[in-house]
Amino acid sequence: MARAVTNNRKIINTAAAWTVGFLIFFPILWTILTSFKTEATAIADPPVFLFFDWTLENYAVVQERSNYARFLWNSIFIAGGSTLLGLLVAVPAAWSMAFVPSKRTKDILLWMLSTKMLPAVGVLYPIYLLFIQFNLLDSIVGLTIVLMLINLPIIVWMLYTYFREIPGEILEAARMDGASLKSEILYVLTPMAIPGIASTLLLNFILAWNEAFWTLNLTAAKAAPLTAFIASYSSPEGLFYAKLSAASTMAILPILILGWFSQKQLVRGLTFGAVK
Amino acid sequence: MGRIQLKKVSKSFGDTLVIPPLDLEIEDGEFVVFVGPSGCGKSTLLRLIAGLEDTTEGNIEIDGQDATDLPPAKRGLAMVFQSYALYPHMTVRKNIAFPMRMAKMSQEEQDSRIESAAKALNLTDYLDRKPGQLSGGQRQRVAIGRAIVREPKAFLFDEPLSNLDAALRVGMRMEISELHKKLDTTMIYVTHDQVEAMTMADKIVVLQAGVIEQVGSPLELYHEPRNKFVAGFIGSPKMNLLEGPEAQKYGAKTIGIRPEHISVSTKSSKGAWKGTVGVAEHLGSDTFIHIHGIEGCDPMTARAAGDVSVRHGDTVYLQPDVAQIHKFDDKGLRIS
């Protein structure tokens, strides 16, 4: 007998979900609230939650002191570029692993994932030295390549999972129908995998946007994205919480909006294949 | 034209030999059925011909040309899959047009071929639907339509009817047979269903463990099975195979007698086998009686008229038609 979900149970579940959601969202909310406070209110003890004199002063100061547009542009270019570049490499890789697997395919997939377990700082030196050698320090191109490489395992894994869901017989039918490998990927595989490809793109864009370790270590001024913009408002000038919060809010806003509009696609993409 | 020759073709997956070297000739315009139990290599053989699998050794010739190393797209064959394998994101029209689009055929030519295929397959009203909105039978027709428009040298069918319900299967079976008569193109059809094989084929190829057991017309296989395996596989219900003293009377290791060649009586007669009724299956037109207690073959099946009334536990006497007895030696081969 199936267990009926009672009304009470529904209410409890909903309340629990909202509580967890709120707890996760709270730091972001607090950052946004703080960005509208004066520096004095920002460090007030006990903290003030909603009833303070709202001010836009921090945003004005941040805007005046640094060139937000340039950081934003760098972020868009690096996140977008690394995502597209990653897709270009990952689609053929995932295709071959999903449809013409060899004995080693599983090992390669695991090995790729295992590189994500390595602490990034472990390869900081070699990469830094390579960057010096190739004159890539503080360049958008260099950063795009590095971010593409660190996110590549995730892109390949996600695409591999989506491609695996596509019945091989359909691709074989395309081959029988006279399609070349290019036509097969272009007219049959890709259109069928579009939902998966879209959520991979989105997730990867968000990951690249939020990446802070490499963007902070390999840039100085020219190629610095929004992560560096936030960082520039931390410690060196002392505790300016309100301005730091304003800078953070400005940095996360674009991705927050993107995430909001694409949440359906993201959730579908991330749970794809889990329920069949 | 569509003459296909396999010369010493074999296939291994890793160290496993699934198809030992075999020779086979398929004439232009023939309807050939590959039949055998699941795992016998019939689908693999079809995929080798299609080019979806590479041969390990041997050559495949299509119309006298060596096609062994040609990719599937270049062989000029069309295939209909068990799962239909339609492109879910395209309408029926686009599905049918796809092979012609790949061949860069002119738009007018495409339209006229789609129209005539749709008409022949009763799909005209569904051309703008997606495959997801069609029933199983309609999907299968779309798959056939997609194959027809290319005017291939041969059609390859991989168990195309096994996803359909019984009534639909009989209908589609006839449609495919009629299509063959109309197009007069070579067709190779894989099935595990011997009824499909018997009713559709010009020539049946019986396979077991990758080995061709017999090639012949349906009636040749029925009347003169080359060995015990073919004898048991072709015909429904299965041929009864008897071993022991009864077989020795005929100078054979095993004798076979089909259910339709046994007469059932409740009265004893000379040389009849005595047994007890286990189950009687009444089909209306016929009654299949499964009988226990006959030495060397348990249960034995016999066909009786539809109005015969026997019950579980009744004693019956079975009289085989001696002229219809098949004899097999120690190796299971036919003694003629």
Image: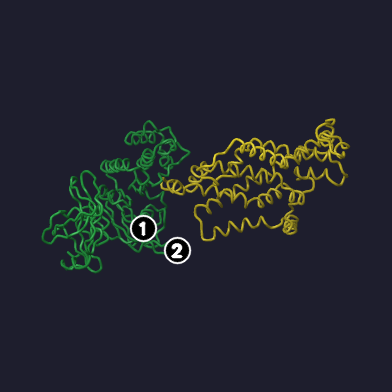
- In the rendered structure, the answer to whether residue B235 lies left or right of residue B13 reads left
* Label pair 2/1, CB-CB below 8 angstroms: no
Residue A62 in percent (x, y) is at 82, 37
Using the image as rendered, state which of residue B97 and residue B316 is in the foreground.
B316
* Rendered image: mark on residue B41: 1
Q: Which mark is residue B194?
A: none
- Where is B251 relative to B322, above or below? below
Residues tagged by mark 2 and mark 1 found on one chain of the structure: yes
Q: Residue furthest front?
A: B313
Spatial CA span between label 2 and label 1: 15 Å
The residue identified by callout 2 is: B14
Q: Position of residue A248 (x, y in %)?
A: 78, 40
Q: Is residue A188 left or right of residue B209?
A: right
Q: Amino acid at mark 1?
A: Gly
Q: Between residues A105 and B244, which one lies in front from this camera angle?
A: B244
Disc 1: CA contacts within 10 A as few (<14), some (14-19) or many (>=20): many
Question: Circle 2 — which element?
Answer: loop
Nearer to me, B106 or B275:
B275
The three-letter code of the residue at mark 2 reads Gly
Residue A272 pos. (x, y %): 56, 45
Q: Quadrant of the C terminus of chain B?
A: bottom left
Viewer-side residue, A62 vs A5: A5
The percent position of residue B100, horizontal first and vertical second, equals 40, 40
Which circle's residue, 2 or 1, is located before the other in the chain? 2
Q: In the displayed structure, does residue B259 sit left or right of residue A86?
A: left
Q: Is the residue marked by circle 2 packed among few (<14), some (14-19), or many (20+) residues within 10 Å?
A: few
Question: What sort of colour scheme is used for the picture?
Answer: by chain
Colour-to-chain, yellow: A
**Height in image: B283 above or below A51?**
below
Per the image, label 1 sits on a secondary structure element best described as loop
